[in-house]
Image (tube, rainbow, N blue to C red):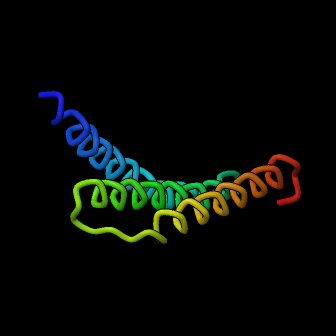
Amino acid sequence: MVEYIPGVLQIAAVFLSVVAGLIAATLFEISKKKDLIAWRPLAIALVLFALEEIVKALRSFGIWSTPYLTHVIPSFILVFLIWSLIRQIEVSGGRI
């Protein structure tokens, strides 16, 4: 029973990351307003997070493995988070 717990947790993480990816996809439509322009890069970061979780689950189950992709995707997530933060500072400062 104990050996099944990591697998069940990985499947739950994949399911929740797919849900997060779907929520992020709906954020694109909502973020057309000028006040919510910083949400677009944040939605991209959320989609990349969902992709990262799926890649990690595939690696942990031994289906597909790549050593570089698990380091590249978090780098892009960080870039989009910083971009979103800068956009939000610009929006709240009145520059946009």
72 lies above or below 12 = below
Q: Please indicate whether residue 18 sits to the left or right of residue 30 in the image.
A: left
For the view shown, which residue lies furthest in the top direction? 1
Q: Can residue 32 be seen in this view?
A: no
Counting the numbered discs, the total is: 0
Tell me which residue sits at (65%, 55%) in the image. Answer: 81
For the view shown, which residue lies furthest in the front direction? 3
Picture coordinates of residue 63 (x, y %)? 21, 65
Q: Please indicate whether residue 80 sits to the left or right of residue 91 in the image.
A: left
Tell me which residue sits at (61%, 54%) in the image. Answer: 39
Image quarter for residue 80?
A: bottom right
Picture coordinates of residue 45 (x, y %)? 55, 58
Picture coordinates of residue 44 (x, y %)? 53, 62
Q: Can residue 11 be seen in this view?
A: yes
Residue toward you, 69 or 39: 69
65 lies above or below 16 = below
Q: Please indicate whether residue 91 sits to the left or right of residue 73 in the image.
A: right
Residue toward you, 94 or 80: 80
Tell me which residue sits at (78%, 56%) in the image. Answer: 86
